[in-house]
Image (spheres, rainbow, N blue to C red):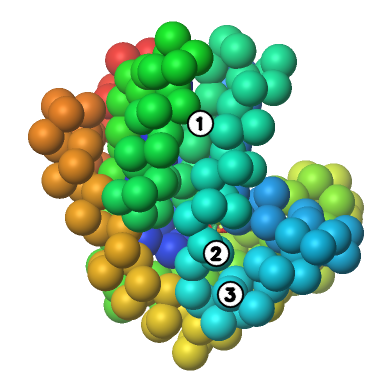
Amino acid sequence: MNVILLGAPGAGKGTQAEKIIAAYGLAHVSTGDILRKAVADGTLLGLEAKRYMDAGELVPDAVVIGLVESRIAEPDAESGFILDGFPRTEAQAEALDGALSEMGERIDAVVSIDVDPRVIVERLTSRRTCKACKKIHSLIADPPADPGTCDACGGELYQRDDDTEATVRNRLDVYERATAPLIDYYRDKALLHAIDGDRPVDVVFADVRAALGV
Ligand code: AP5
Ligand code: MG
């Protein structure tokens, strides 16, 4: 099964992806995570991507499309993958269609997680991520016992550089302009399942499961 998770920054794509992977073992293809790793490793890709990410702008299509094409060709993606944060533009969606048809693959479902932008600013400024195991935490919805320590593995929690209020607002504008039109793109292909993401994580997950038919 190949799934796309669509949704604004902070809608809960990464949180739901963690749960889908734990339950069904699909490969997690998060362009944001791939780019953040490149930044942390100090590669040329990371140096180029960082200035876009810190400003809340999209990294150029050609760069991201190349990354995803190689990632979905890796062995762990053979039995299915979740695209988290890709595609984000119509050009990316069309490139994905082309790459999948060359591979004899297709997208089975697109889950769009919808959350009011006013909720999102608060969510993202209180998000913390584990440096070691990458688990996503919330200081509001599910606070860790110690605000600096991961409940899952004891690793150090950090705040993403792009989770400042000004950058979050720009990311939301970019989402509305560049990515929200993909909702209609996938509705027209009869692949879209829209889910209210402004409910507790497990309630949202129950709807995700129902949408995926698993
Ligand atoms: P990316 O890493 O994809 O970030 P994003 O889309 O902005 O989304 P986030 O990761 O911020 O949010 P999320 O939906 O995963 O929410 P989460 O589950 O963490 O991209 C970052 C940057 O990389 C982009 O700005 C761009 O520069 C570049 N990039 C990436 N992909 C690209 C592409 N395809 N093309 C071009 N550039 C690209 O949840 C957020 C918080 O809310 C957490 O604290 C969580 O605990 C909490 N939470 C989650 N669900 C709930 C709930 N139901 N109730 C209460 N709290 C909840
Ligand atoms: Mg994410």
| Dot in front, 3 or 1 | 3
User: Foreground residue, 128 or 56?
Assistant: 56
Counting from the top left corner in percent of width and height, residue 175 is at 34, 66
Residue type at mark 3?
Tyr
Which quadrant would the C terminus be assigned to in this image?
top left
Which secondary structure, mark 2?
Answer: loop
Counting from the top left corner in percent of width and height, residue 25 is at 61, 19
The residue at which mark 2 appears reads as 59
Circle 1 packing at 10 Å, graded few (<14), some (14-19), many (20+), is many
Residue type at mark 1?
Ile
Task: Mark 3 and ligand 1: say if the CB distance to the nearest ligand atom is below 8 Å.
Answer: yes
Can you name the residue that lies furthest to the bottom here? Answer: 166
Whether residue 113 is visible = no
Which label sits on residue 119?
A: none
Name the N-terminal-most of marks 2 and 1. Answer: 2
The residue at which mark 3 appears reads as 52
Give the residue drawn at x 50%, y 31%. Answer: 82
Give the residue drawn at x 87%, y 65%. Answer: 42
| Dot in front, 2 or 1 | 2
Counting from the top left corner in percent of width and height, residue 87 is at 41, 46
The residue at which mark 1 appears reads as 82
Q: Quick check: 48 left or right of 54?
A: right
Which secondary structure, mark 3?
Answer: helix
Give the residue drawn at x 51%, y 83%. Answer: 167
Verify CB contact (< 8 Å) between mark 3 and mark 2: yes
